[in-house]
Image: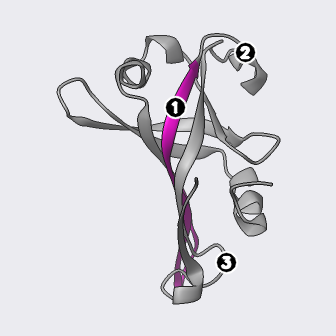
Amino acid sequence: MSHFTEKEIEYLRGQRLGRLATVGSDGSPHVVPVGFRLDAEGQAIEVGGHGLSGSKKWRDLQANPRTALVIDDLASVTPWTPRGIEVRGRAELHSAGGEKFGPGWDSAWIRIVPERIISWGIDGAAFSPAGRHARSIT
């Protein structure tokens, strides 16, 4: 069973770009755009990249695996219709297999195991109680 709802899965599979947040060794936040995909089982987010193993995000996650990824967009600007998902969790760093993301991608990749999922505008209007969901994964 997936940690994500069916509508969240549909949304995630339709998106390719998110923003990954990490914390540097000095405690400074670092946020960068990354390519991602939902794993086949719908249990975790997989992040790939170019030069990933030499990046600041990789070094940050080696020291502190806690991370957050936000995937969002605007379904419409008239009316204003934001939607998105925030996944907070722990990163697992993999030094091989990242080629699965496509030609030219680094062999390194990151698996984010969700601990908390917050979504808005996916299952209903973003500014309504029905459209905002937050849950912890145990």
Q: CA distance from mark 2 to mark 1?
A: 16 Å
User: Which residue, given by chain and number where applicable, does mark 3 sit on?
Assistant: 123
Answer with mark 2 or mark 1, whichever residue precedes in sequence: 1
Give the side of residue 74 with respect to residue 23, left or right: right
Asked if residue 79 lies in the magenta stretch, the reply is yes
Kindly indicate whether the residue at mark 1 contacts the one at mark 2 (C-beta within 8 angstroms): no
Give the side of residue 78 with respect to residue 3, left or right: left
Name the residue rendered at 23%, 23% in the picture. 25
Give the number of the mark in front: 2 or 1. 1
Residue nearer the viewer, 24 or 125: 24
Q: Position of residue 17 (x, y in %)?
A: 59, 44
User: Which residue, given by chain and number where applicable, does mark 1 sit on?
Assistant: 91
User: What range of the chain is rendered magenta?
Assistant: 71-93
The answer to whether 27 is drawn above or below residue 93 in the figure is below
- Prevailing SS of the magenta stretch: strand
Asked if residue 134 lies in the magenta stretch, the reply is no
Q: CA distance from mark 3 to mark 1?
A: 27 Å
Amino acid type at image mark 3:
Asp
Q: Position of residue 48 (x, y in %)?
A: 62, 27
User: Which residue, given by chain and number where applicable, does mark 2 sit on?
Assistant: 97
Kindly indicate whether the residue at mark 3 contacts the one at mark 2 (C-beta within 8 angstroms): no
Q: Secondary structure at mark 3?
A: loop
